[in-house]
Image (cartoon, rainbow, N blue to C red):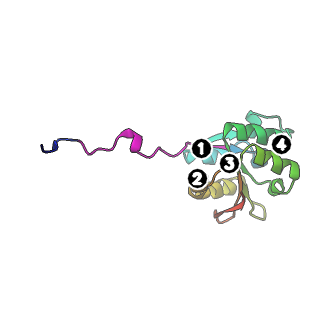
Amino acid sequence: MAANADTSKKPSDASLPSPPERLVFFVDRSLGRKVIPDALRAAGEEVRVHDDFFPQDAKDEVWLTDVGRRGWVVLTKDKHIRYREVEVRALLAAKVRAFILTAKGDLSGTEVGQIFVKAMPAMKKLCENTAPPFIARVSRDSSVSLIKH
């Protein structure tokens, strides 16, 4: 008996790849509360701001633990966070994905916002392809490179 020619060749929903995770970007206090978050939101990103969730003087290990638990992606310009043992332990234990702006010199909030927006495709790709925890560098030219995994 011949196979039914009307059988659908459409793949089942189970075989379709799942859509990429909707990332939430957490802007730490070193990046401010308005200009940089607004630039990221204008680019269509979901953003949370440090001061909306934590006191200004919250210790890094406290907010890193909470942000990691929530699965948010950290954006910071605190270059020293990767060298301080307490913060590194908290970051690794909480499985944080962190991007550190390492550009030297004085940059305005607008310039920093533009750097992160331009780096967004590379940051999202790294988040898709690299299991947390990790620390990555965002350079002045918006290039992204993994520092610690």
> Residue at position x 59%, y 44% from top?
23
Q: Position of residue 134 (x, y in %)?
A: 71, 53
Q: Which mark is residue 23?
A: 1
Toward the viewer: 103 or 84? 84
Disc 3 marks which residue? 36
In the image, farthest residue toward the left = 1
Where disc 3 sits, the SS reads helix
Label 4 packing within 10 angstroms: few (<14), some (14-19), many (20+): some
Q: Position of residue 15 (x, y in %)?
A: 40, 44
Q: Nearer the viewer, mark 1 or mark 3?
A: 1
Toward the viewer: 34 or 21? 21
Q: Which mark is residue 95?
A: none
Where disc 4 sits, the SS reads helix
Magenta span: 8-25
Q: Return the disc, 2 or 1, that comes first in the chain's sequence.
A: 1
Main secondary structure found in the magenta portion: loop
Q: Is residue 122 left or right of residue 30?
A: left
Q: Are marks 3 and 2 in contact (CB under 8 Å)?
A: no
Q: Are marks 4 and 2 in contact (CB under 8 Å)?
A: no
Magenta span contains residue 62: no
Disc 2 marks which residue? 124
Q: Return the disc, 1 or 3, that comes first in the chain's sequence.
A: 1
Disc 4 marks which residue? 61
Q: Are marks 4 and 1 in contact (CB under 8 Å)?
A: no
Q: Return the disc, 4 or 1, that comes first in the chain's sequence.
A: 1
Q: Are marks 2 and 1 in contact (CB under 8 Å)?
A: yes
Count of marks placed on residues: 4
Amino acid beneath label 3: Ile
Q: CA distance from mark 3 to mark 2?
A: 17 Å
